[in-house]
């Protein structure tokens, strides 16, 4: 299977864990980079132990781990040992990019901070992912997606009107931070072609969460009014939310006045488009309660299937409120190949979500399934020039984990 090869020849050391950093590194791997996941010896990445698990048993991997660690090799080591640090530094001399997500000062104590690694390898791009950044009074704070949703104010504007705050369950702050880190790394990689020097890239969950709130904050600064949880509605557009039909709900997206007139025509009430309360989007927002009530009454008259056909034919944005299973089974999902199949040496045939971008019409593929812990430690050390005796000595000293090698996988 072929994947996009824009980053062929680029080596990445991924010291990060959980979601933001691993997703960033996975996308670098999808683009062709050689990504080596640098994992703690005993348990590896935390998400290996997050349920649901692929199999019963303590040594099975969690599904979250598999979702963000394809196209990587696993190197399991103890950076607190002299042998582990030496092997790591030798490997860093061959790297183009390092990604880490340790707490403040930890990377420096382990000898993999940006100053130490970039002094030895001036072309290195060192990316640090943290909760609140490396400066400011919150720099020591623990960074978790839900915590930053709360700290940033996101939770104050999510959920149903009058209800409890609702966490966005797909971890947008983590995933967004991974994407911002990816953008910074790719920019630094391009800049290096001109300067010959590496760069320090910093991304944080706090910065991402504030960045996501940009247009909402712009309105807050103008009005001085704290936005309230809108449910599925939009503070600046109306009608633009979920409505019940005669059987199942739809999301109606009337984003401008042309679409409003089209909707009114399809609904059989063209005169409604000229009602002063509803004629413009601004007036509909000002009369939101009346607008929503009127549209609700109209949509309740017909089935979801009827509305989908009629509104889609007229060019009015509308969608069923799909379950995940419905989305995955939809013909469009299959046609665009965002869900792909691959073979894992232990867990068999699996699905994965592809990188959501194409280059010259080509989608990335899974050349390597998410690795087992320490699966490639031996092979990577051999690439660095260690012979079997030296590798054995490192294992005996507790510096590396050889528990899962290619030979072992063949016997499982």
Image: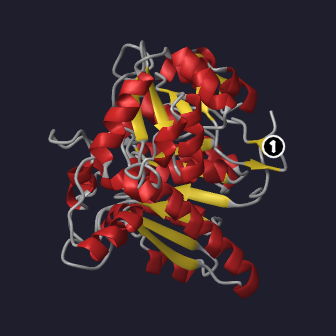
Task: Tell me the SS state at disc 1.
Answer: strand
Task: Using the image as rendered, state which of residue 326 and residue 202 is in the foreground.
Answer: 326
Residue sticking out furthest to the bottom = 195
- Which residue is disc 1 drawn over? 362
Figure check: 361 above or below 62: below
Q: Residue 99, image x and y in percent?
A: 50, 61
Q: Residue at x 34, y 31 (%)?
A: 49
Task: Using the image as rendered, state which of residue 171 and residue 341 is in the foreground.
Answer: 171
Figure check: 4 above or below 412: below
Left/right placement of residue 384 relative to residue 46 reads: right
Q: Is residue 344 visible?
A: no
Q: Residue 393, image x and y in percent?
A: 49, 47
Left/right placement of residue 208 relative to residue 376 reads: left
Q: Residue at x 45, y 54 (%)?
A: 281
Task: Using the image as rendered, state which of residue 93 and residue 220 is in the foreground.
Answer: 220
Figure check: 156 above or below 395: below
Q: Residue 223, image x and y in percent?
A: 26, 72
Residue sticking out furthest to the right = 360
Q: Which picture quadrant has residue 93?
A: bottom right
């Amino acid at each position: 299977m072929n994947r996009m090869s824009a980053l062929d020849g680029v080596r990445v050391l991924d010291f990060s864990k959980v979601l933001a950093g691993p997703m960033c590194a996975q996308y670098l791997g999808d683009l062709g980079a050689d990504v080596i996941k640098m994992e703690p010896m005993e348990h590896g990445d935390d998400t290996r132990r997050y349920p649901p698990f692929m199999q019963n048993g303590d040594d099975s991997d969690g599904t979250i781990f598999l979702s963000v660690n394809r196209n990587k090799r696993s190197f399991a080591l103890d950076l607190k040992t002299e042998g582990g640090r030496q092997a790591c530094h030798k490997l860093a001399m061959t790297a183009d990019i390092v990604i880490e997500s340790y707490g403040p000062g930890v990377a420096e104590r382990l000898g993999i901070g940006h100053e130490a690694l970039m002094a030895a390898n001036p072309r290195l791009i060192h990316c640090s992912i943290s909760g609140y950044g490396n400066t400011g009074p919150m720099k020591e704070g623990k960074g978790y997606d839900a915590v930053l949703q709360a700290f940033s104010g996101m939770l104050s504007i999510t959920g149903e009107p009058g209800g409890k705050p609702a966490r966005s369950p797909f971890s947008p702050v983590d995933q967004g931070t991974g994407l911002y880190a990816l953008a910074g790394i790719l920019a630094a990689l391009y800049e290096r072609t001109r300067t010959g020097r590496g760069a320090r890239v910093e991304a944080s969950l706090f910065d991402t969460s504030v960045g996501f709130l940009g247009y909402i904050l712009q309105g807050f600064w103008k009005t001085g009014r704290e936005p309230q949880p809108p449910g599925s509605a939009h503070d600046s557009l109306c009608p633009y939310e979920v409505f019940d039909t005669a059987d199942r709900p739809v999301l109606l997206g009337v984003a401008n006045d042309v679409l409003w007139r089209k909707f009114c025509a399809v609904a059989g009430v063209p005169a409604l488009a000229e009602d002063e309360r509803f004629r413009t989007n601004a007036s509909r927002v000002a009369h939101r309660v009346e607008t929503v009530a009127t549209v609700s009454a109209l949509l309740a008259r017909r089935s979801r299937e009827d509305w989908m056909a009629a509104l889609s034919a007229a060019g009015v944005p509308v969608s069923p409120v799909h379950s995940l299973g419905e989305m995955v089974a939809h013909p469009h999902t299959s046609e665009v190949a965002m869900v792909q199949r691959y073979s894992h040496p232990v867990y068999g045939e699996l699905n994965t979500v592809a990188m959501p971008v194409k280059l010259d019409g080509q989608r990335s593929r899974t050349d390597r399934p998410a690795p087992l812990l320490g699966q490639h430690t031996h092979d990577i050390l051999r690439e660095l020039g260690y012979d079997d005796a030296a590798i054995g000595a490192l294992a005996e000293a507790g510096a590396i984990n050889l528990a899962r090698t290619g030979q072992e996988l063949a016997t499982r």
